[in-house]
Image: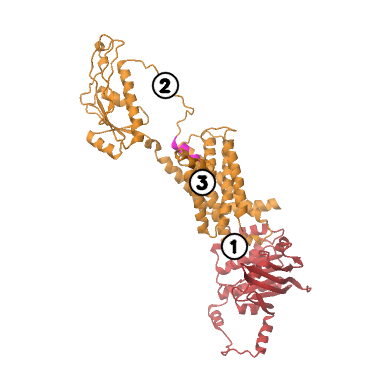
Chain colours: A orange, B red
Amino acid sequence: MKIKSFLILFYTTLKMFIRDRQTWFWSLVIPLLILTIFGLIDFERLGKIKIGWVDPVANDLSQKIEKSLEEISIVELKKGSFSKLKKDLQEGGIDLLLVLPSDLPAQLPQNNPSLAPSNEKTALLPSHRSPTNSAPPTPSQPAGKKTVSLPSVKIEVWYDPANMEKTDPGLMLVEQVFSQLNLQLTGQKPFFTLEQKSVDSRNLSYLDFITPGLVGMMIMQLGIIGVAMTLVRFREQDILKRLRLTPIKPSLFLASLLGTRLLLLILQAALLIILGKVLFDLHLQAHYLGVVLFVILGSLTFLSLGFAVSGMARSLNMAMAIAQMVQMPMMFLSGVFFPREGFPLWLQRVTDYLPLTFLAEGLRQTLIQGVQWPDFRANLGALLIWSLVGFILARQFFRWE
Amino acid sequence: MSAEAIIKVENLRKTYNGLIAVAGISFAVKKGEIFGILGPNGAGKTTTLEMIETLRRPDEGKIWIKGIDVQREPQKIKTLIGVQLQSTSFFDYLNLKELLTLFASFYPQALAVEETLALVGLEDKAQAMVRQLSGGQKQRFSLAAALIHDPEIIFLDEPTAGLDPQARRHLWEIIRQLHQRGKTIVLTTHYMDEAELLCQRVAIMDEGQILRLAPPRKLIEDLLAQGFKKSAQQLQANLEDVFLDLTGKYLRD
């Protein structure tokens, strides 16, 4: 009898939600919209160092330099006239400006056999900063007997001192490029070489970072607002009162509400992940059982918080306001959109304990980072504690009238 | 307790934040009668009903339905009574048939959904949603939800409030039919004509107390016996008769 009542209730409640267009809007349209927006933004471009490139000669050598700069993945070259690019630099359109001298030799000296005997060392192309000129030009170094004295070529590097975060790495990068060119041109083998080894061979994107967080955020929003609004509406319209007139156990009704919402949240999380994979080629490396556990515990946590919020609110508007007050800070403080490392330390410590922090981090571990059991148990355990806290709060605050 | 009393209320009292809503009332409802509770807004009618319906706990006093203590065994009471609240909504996105099926599932025994809809004249609306119904249809559906488990006692809180004359008459007809089937009906109303027409006995309440309890006819005769006279001469018809004569008695929704 009880199980049958529950099944009928569950089925009917599900039918209700499925027929409600709002359910579809919040569970389908909004996540898709957010995912699309974040999928379309090229976050990698924001992190690139944009270098202006003034090349008055366009000969073999200048082209060689240009090519080695362009080969660097985080560099974006922008060609143009000096006056225009300088204005760009001042306005923040580019981060550095390289100006080649108009007397840049087209041919490299050691390409000429007579000038390139073995073991000859010649320094070429020293970089220096201009207009501050902090690095004095390195004089050419005579070495060995058959020295060919070459004039060093000055290349101006302009920068904007206000743009510190891009200037310094940019200058280092440019200096590195030229010192490598120096070595190449002089035919010297480098003593040290760096071998790149990544723990993750996949090229993870910002979307990979953000999608698990988005799934967590969606669970939070649908959990808290969805349940709180529904319950307050049921209460305002005397639907809860009408149910209390029937012999059904009130807890059975609440359980079916919780159950249907939980099911919808699981489906929705799956949908968001699948859409991310299909549309934006998420780099999934998932521990699926872990993902499911995080989705369930996260849903239970936020659904029970929704029950609590419904009890605190006297009206629909108030429910909305309280829900937003709970959700908004978490949205931005739980590391959904950006890592929390940028926060002041005290804020990091506080936000360490937010339920969405555990959910977002847990989903990131199990969905993208390929973390295996039991390495995600800390987040899972914390979320379990949060779902119990939510349950206690729901019991404390929920009311029928 | 008198043998025929199906509901018995003794010294019922309820206070909200120091305001007395019900001030120690006692009365009994006889099996098979239509019992009216009349009174201005705030008289304590709805509070009294809700205490009998198990929705509120009295501060003091006792209530028995068929000899069962309402406060002690509310679950048993819930299968005996059917309640139409003053203005209930139902779940959105479910049609009438689905709603009644759901309500039927809450009870150990229930009538067939179609039969219940036919009882209130909504058999054609099984697939409609509540929001698509007219005011009168909504009230009748609310009544159907109260009847689904075939209760012995039916509570109606202002069943005809806000309805047009045709719809009111239609609802009266349904209430009479229920009465003929032997149901006990307790209703509140602001319409004196309704109480006079339907109720065997009425209790007139004000400020949480019952001022009078008797058949309507008896109350009128008592008043006349005191020498009461209407200030204006009464005609044999009123404006409602004119309205119905012009617009007909058939139901519009």
Please report, as a chain letter, where disc 1 is located.
A
Up-down relation of residue A369 to residue A153 (above or below): below
The question of residue A279 being in magenta is answered with no
Q: Which mark is residue A194?
A: 2
Q: Callout 1: helix, strand or loop?
A: loop
Q: Quadrant of residue A366?
A: top right
Q: Amino acid at mark 2?
A: Leu
Which percent across, then down, holds residue B124? 59, 64
Q: Marks 2 and 3: same chain?
A: yes
Whether the residues at callouts 2 and 3 have beta carbons within 8 Å, the answer is no
- Specify start and end residues of the magenta stretch as a single range: A205-212
Please report, as a chain letter, where disc 2 is located.
A
Mark 2 or mark 3: which comes first in sequence?
Answer: 2
Q: CA distance from mark 2 to mark 1?
A: 71 Å
Q: Callout 2: helix, strand or loop?
A: loop
In this rendered view, identify the residue nearer to me: A263 or B22. Answer: B22
Up-down relation of residue A192 to residue A75 (above or below): above
In this rendered view, identify the residue nearer to me: A310 or A76. Answer: A310
Mark 2 or mark 1: which comes first in sequence?
Answer: 2
The residue wearing badge 1 is: A238
Q: Amino acid at mark 1?
A: Asp
The residue wearing badge 3 is: A218
Up-down relation of residue B147 to residue A363 (above or below): below
Q: CA distance from mark 1 to mark 3?
A: 29 Å
Q: Residues within 10 Å of mark 1 (few under 14, many from 20)?
A: many
